[in-house]
Image (tube, grey):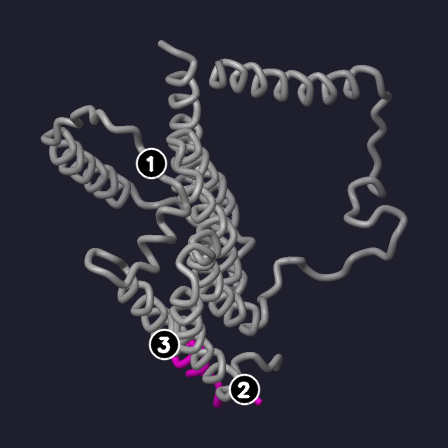
């Protein structure tokens, strides 16, 4: 086993153990913090794969944005500090079965793909992403880039409409 | 070589921090009293629980932040490629920003950015 492989297994073990802790923790706030560590681990995995831009996106959006959102939504509830009751046995078994089937399904699908080695070096330069994004010619991504802004606009309008719905009762 | 030195770095980091904690545990004389367990030692005694319900405003701001966060992601590749692409890049990013600015105006108009 090479040193690079050891790093991979270390990061994977970190991600998986943090994920298990996140699911099994009885306190919902702690779950969110374990999730945070798990997402940081995934960013580490991206760095290990040498895709720095994706790793930066992972940290900025998932660690810096979504986890903050989750923590705020936990604090919106009244039970943020309370210990959750233990799940009934039947639900634990059902959950384990669902996980098992999900794992089997994904594993079989991924296993079908042979993962052939490619000859050309992997180019993941940010400049290349930018050039493709701004390219208006055939095969460019200029239109999807602009459509993304409309998607973000729709998301923004949607979240304002939903979040401000319960306004009349206060005041 | 890079990966091996990374492993050494991780081990050294764990050893140093664990060593510092262990040495502090061994060398210092630990005293325990009620005062020490307070959140603000030699401060005003705290009242009530610290797990309070947050204002919904935080959530709304976090939601809007997340959207501009995603917008920010697109700025990085744009900034790297902008000089080479030239004027076209400027036009494209202005269209991109204009559409998102409409969303910002909408949020402002609806009072989502007002602190209640």
Q: In this rendering, would B51 be left or right of A46? A: right
Determine if the magenta segment contains residue A109. Answer: no
Q: Residue furthest right?
A: B42
Q: Residue furthest top?
A: A1
Q: Residues within 10 Å of mark 3 (few under 14, many from 20)?
A: few
Q: Give whichever of discs 3 and 1 has the lower sequence position.
A: 1
- Quarter the N terminus of chain A occupies: top left
Q: Position of residue B20 (x, y in %)?
A: 74, 20
Q: Are marks 3 and 1 in contact (CB under 8 Å)?
A: no
Q: Which residue in the protein does label 2 denote?
A: A170
Q: Which residue in the protein does label 3 denote?
A: A158
Determine if the magenta segment contains residue A161. Answer: yes
Label 3 vs label 2, nearer the camera: 3
Q: Which residue in the protein does label 1 denote?
A: A123
Q: Residues within 10 Å of mark 2 (few under 14, many from 20)?
A: few
Mark 3 to mark 2: distance in Å? 21 Å
Front-most of residues A144 and A115: A144
Q: Residues within 10 Å of mark 1 (few under 14, many from 20)?
A: few
Chain at tag 3: A
Vertical comparison of A65 with A59: above or below: below
- Quarter the C terminus of chain A occupies: bottom right
Q: Residue, x 62% and y 16% (percent of image)?
A: B12
Q: In this rendering, would A166 be left or right of B21? A: left
Q: Residue, x 54% and y 86% (percent of image)?
A: A170
The part of the chain drawn in magenta is A159-171
Q: Position of residue A34 (x, y in %)?
A: 48, 41
Mark 3 to mark 1: distance in Å? 37 Å
Front-most of residues A131 and A93: A131
């Amino acid at each position: 086993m090479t040193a690079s492989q050891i790093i991979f297994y270390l990061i994977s073990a970190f991600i998986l153990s943090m994920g298990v802790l996140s699911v099994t923790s009885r306190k919902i706030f702690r779950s969110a913090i374990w999730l945070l560590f798990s997402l940081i681990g995934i960013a580490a995995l991206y760095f290990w794969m040498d895709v720095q831009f994706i790793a930066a996106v992972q940290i900025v959006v998932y660690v810096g944005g979504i986890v903050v959102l989750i923590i705020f939504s936990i604090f919106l509830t009244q039970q943020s500090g309370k210990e959750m009751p233990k799940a009934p046995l039947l639900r634990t078994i059902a959950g384990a079965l669902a996980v098992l089937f999900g794992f089997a399904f994904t594993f079989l699908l991924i296993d079908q793909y042979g993962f052939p080695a490619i000859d050309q070096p992997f180019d993941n330069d940010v400049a290349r992403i930018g050039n493709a994004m701004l390219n208006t010619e055939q095969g460019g991504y200029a239109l999807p880039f602009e459509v993304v802004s409309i998607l973000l606009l729709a998301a923004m309008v949607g979240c304002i409409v939903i979040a401000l719905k319960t306004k009349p009762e206060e005041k | 070589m890079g990966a091996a030195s990374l492993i050494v770095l991780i081990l050294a980091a764990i050893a140093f921090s664990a060593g510092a904690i262990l040495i502090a545990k061994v060398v210092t004389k630990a005293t325990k009293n009620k005062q020490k367990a307070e959140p603000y030692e030699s401060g005003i005694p705290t009242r009530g629980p610290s797990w309070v319900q947050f204002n919904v405003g935080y959530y709304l701001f976090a939601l809007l932040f997340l959207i501009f966060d995603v917008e920010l992601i697109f700025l990085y590749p744009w900034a790297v490629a902008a000089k080479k692409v030239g004027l076209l890049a400027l036009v494209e990013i202005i269209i991109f920003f204009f559409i998102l600015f409409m969303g910002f105006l909408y949020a402002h108009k609806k009072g989502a950015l007002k602190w209640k």
